[in-house]
C-alpha cells in the first residue's frame, strides 16, 4: 500500500518542473523575447512590403497621420536608402537582448527609446535622460553621407516611424500576455489563445493544473473511509496531507503567475500611454536634435522628396552664408 502511494505521488509531483526553475523569471524572459521577435518581425514586414512595391509601383495607401505600423511603412516607402537603413538599424538596436523590453518593465522606456534613437544616428548613448545637456556639448558629431562632417541630418519621419514601430510591438506583446492571462483564468477559450493554447501553458507551467492532485485526493479519501487497517490508514492520512500541501502550493504559484502577467501587461500599457500621447514623437524628435546637433533636411528634400537627405552638391561651400535655408528652420 505504501509503495503504491509513493508511486502515485511521484507521478503527480514528477512533472513539477517549477521546483527546478523560477516560473516568474521564465515568463518575464519570455515576454522580452516575444517583444524582441515581434519588433524585428514588424520591421522586416515593412522592409519586405516596400521591396515588393519597388520600381515605382503605387501601394494604394494614404499617408498615415497617427502612429502605428502604417506610419512606419509610409515613411519607409518614401525614404532614401540611407533613411531606410536608419530604421533597420533602429530595429537592431531596440529589439535585441531585451534592450527596450527590459526598460519597459523597469518603467524607463522613454529614456531607452531616446537612447536607441540616439545610437541609431551614430551618437554615444546617455545613461540618463537628464544627461541630455551634457551630451549636447560633449558628444562627437558623426558624418552622414552627403553632408559636411560637422552636421547630422535626418528626417522627422524617422522619429515618427520608430515610435510607431515600438507602439505596434507593444500592442502585440501586451495582447499575447493578456491572452495568456485569459487562458490561465479561464476567461479565454483555447481556440482564442493564439500561440499559447491551454495545453501548451500547462506543459510549460505544470502548476497551472491541479486536476491530477485533486483526483488522487478524492481517491485517498475514499480509500481512507473503507480501510480498517491501521497502517493503511496512517499511510493514506500522510498521503492526503502531502497532496493537500501540493494543491495549496500550486494555487499559490498560480496566483503569483497571474500577478506577474498583470504586471507585464500594466508595464506595457504604461509605455503605450506615454508613446501614444499627442506630441510625444515631436517632443522626442526635438530632444534628439538638441542632443545630437542634428538638422532637418531642406523643405524641398524632406520626407516626401526623392531623397531623405540633401545631396552634397546642394550644401553651401564651407564658410558660405546659408542665408534663409534649412539652418533657419525651427526644430520640429
Image (cartoon, rainbow, N blue to C red):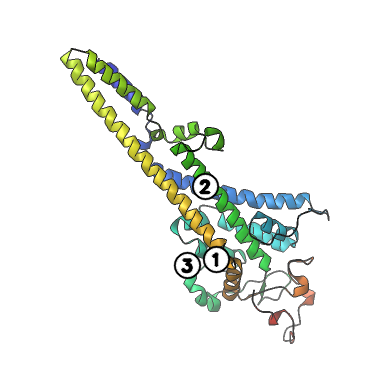
The foreground one among 292 and 255 is: 255
At 32% from the left and 22% from the top, the residue drawn is 216
The foreground one among 203 and 187 is: 187
Question: Mark 3 and mark 2: span between their CA atoms?
Answer: 23 Å
Q: Position of residue 205 (x, y in %)?
A: 42, 36
At 53% from the left and 67% from the top, the residue drawn is 125
For marks 2 and 1 on the same chain, the one whose residue lies earlier in the sequence: 2
Tell me the residue that label 1 is attached to.
114
* Local secondary structure at mark 1: helix
Q: Quadrant of residue 218?
A: top left
Q: Position of residue 158 (x, y in %)?
A: 66, 64
For marks 1 and 3 on the same chain, the one whose residue lies earlier in the sequence: 1
* Local secondary structure at mark 2: helix
Tell me the residue that label 2 is attached to.
33
Tell me the residue that label 3 is attached to.
127
Quadrant of image for the N terminus = top left
Q: Does residue 232 sit above or below 250 in this rendering?
A: above
At 72% from the left and 58% from the top, the residue drawn is 74
Amino acid at each position: 500500500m505504501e509503495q503504491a502511494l509513493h508511486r502515485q505521488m511521484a507521478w503527480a509531483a514528477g512533472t513539477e518542473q517549477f521546483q527546478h526553475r523560477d516560473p516568474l523569471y521564465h515568463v518575464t524572459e519570455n515576454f522580452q523575447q516575444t517583444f524582441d521577435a515581434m519588433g524585428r518581425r514588424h520591421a522586416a514586414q515593412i522592409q519586405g512590403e516596400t521591396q515588393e512595391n519597388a520600381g515605382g509601383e503605387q501601394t494604394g495607401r494614404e499617408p498615415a497621420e497617427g502612429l502605428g505600423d502604417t506610419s512606419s511603412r509610409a515613411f519607409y516607402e518614401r525614404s532614401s536608402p540611407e533613411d531606410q537603413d536608419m530604421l533597420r538599424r533602429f530595429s537592431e538596436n531596440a529589439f535585441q537582448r531585451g534592450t527596450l523590453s527590459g526598460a519597459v518593465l523597469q518603467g524607463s522606456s522613454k529614456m531607452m527609446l531616446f537612447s536607441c534613437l540616439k545610437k541609431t544616428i551614430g551618437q554615444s548613448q546617455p545613461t540618463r535622460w537628464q544627461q541630455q545637456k551634457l551630451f549636447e556639448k560633449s558628444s562627437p558629431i558623426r558624418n552622414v553621407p552627403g553632408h559636411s562632417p560637422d552636421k547630422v541630418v535626418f528626417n522627422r519621419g524617422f522619429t515618427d516611424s520608430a515610435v510607431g514601430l515600438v507602439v505596434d510591438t507593444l500592442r502585440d506583446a501586451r495582447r499575447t500576455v493578456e491572452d495568456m492571462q485569459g487562458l490561465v483564468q479561464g476567461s479565454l477559450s483555447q481556440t482564442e489563445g493564439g500561440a499559447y493554447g491551454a495545453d501548451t501553458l500547462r506543459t510549460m507551467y505544470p502548476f497551472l493544473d491541479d486536476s491530477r492532485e485533486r483526483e488522487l485526493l478524492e481517491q485517498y479519501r475514499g480509500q481512507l473511509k473503507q480501510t480498517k487497517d491501521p497502517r493503511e490508514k496512517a499511510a493514506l492520512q500522510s498521503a492526503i496531507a502531502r497532496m493537500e500541501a501540493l494543491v495549496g502550493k500550486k494555487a499559490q504559484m498560480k496566483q503569483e503567475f497571474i500577478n506577474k502577467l498583470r504586471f507585464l501587461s500594466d508595464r506595457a500599457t504604461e509605455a503605450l500611454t506615454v508613446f501614444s500621447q499627442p506630441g510625444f514623437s515631436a517632443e522626442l524628435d526635438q530632444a534628439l536634435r538638441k542632443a545630437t546637433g542634428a538638422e532637418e533636411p531642406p523643405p524641398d528634400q524632406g520626407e516626401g522628396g526623392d531623397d531623405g537627405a540633401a545631396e552634397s552638391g546642394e550644401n553651401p561651400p564651407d564658410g558660405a552664408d546659408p542665408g534663409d535655408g534649412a539652418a533657419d528652420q525651427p526644430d520640429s
